[in-house]
Amino acid sequence: MSWKLASCLIAVVAILFITACQSDENLEFKRYYSSGALVYQQHCQNCHGAGGEGLSALIPPLSDSIYLRKNLTALPCYIKNGLKGSITIKGKTFEDVMPANDLSPVEIAQVLTYIGNSFDNKLSTIDEQSVQKNLASCH
């Protein structure tokens, strides 16, 4: 057996071993997070910024874990239906209108998982089932 073939076999076995050791929850989180990053880039980044920093007094930052945790059940509604009225993030009030997005429940779950685990936030996976349940409660 040649050295190159042996190296390739070792690499394949190592990758299989690493993948097999990950839990289903960890794999689900990675799928949601990576897909959510793409949804964020396409639908949210233009306003909220690449780093979730928002835009001065017009668009709120997405780096307030306390706000995200407190409003976790309402966030899918904000994304789907938009948001009007004032909100306070990190002690600063924002009154601009957030437009509605035509995202599917799984896309909303993905982007919330991404936001909830980026920009210094530390939430867990937000799955499609919880988003669908929360969307059914939108006012």
Image (tube, grey):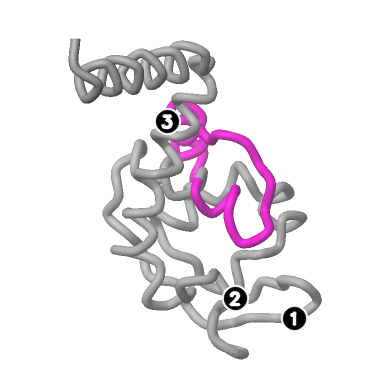
Compute the Cα span from label 2 to label 1: 8 Å
Q: Nearer the viewer, residue 18 or 95?
A: 18
Give the residue pinned by disc 3: 128
Q: In the image, residue 129 lies at what x, y percent? A: 45, 25
Which residue is drawn at the image coordinates 35% and 36% (left, top)? 106
Compute the Cα span from label 2 to label 3: 25 Å
**Looking at the picture, which amino acid does disc 1 mark?**
Lys
The answer to whether 130 appears left or right of 1 in the picture is right
Q: Which residues are magenta?
A: 114-139
Give the residue pinned by disc 1: 92
Q: In the image, residue 38 lies at what x, y percent? A: 32, 54
Q: Are marks 2 and 1 in contact (CB under 8 Å)?
A: yes
Q: Nearer the viewer, residue 48 or 101?
A: 48
Which secondary structure lies at badge 3? helix
**Looking at the picture, which amino acid does disc 2 mark?**
Pro
Give the residue pinned by disc 2: 60
First of labels 2, 1 by sequence position: 2
* Magenta residue check for 39: no
**Looking at the picture, which amino acid does disc 3 mark?**
Glu
Which secondary structure lies at badge 2? loop
First of labels 2, 3 by sequence position: 2
Which secondary structure lies at badge 1? strand
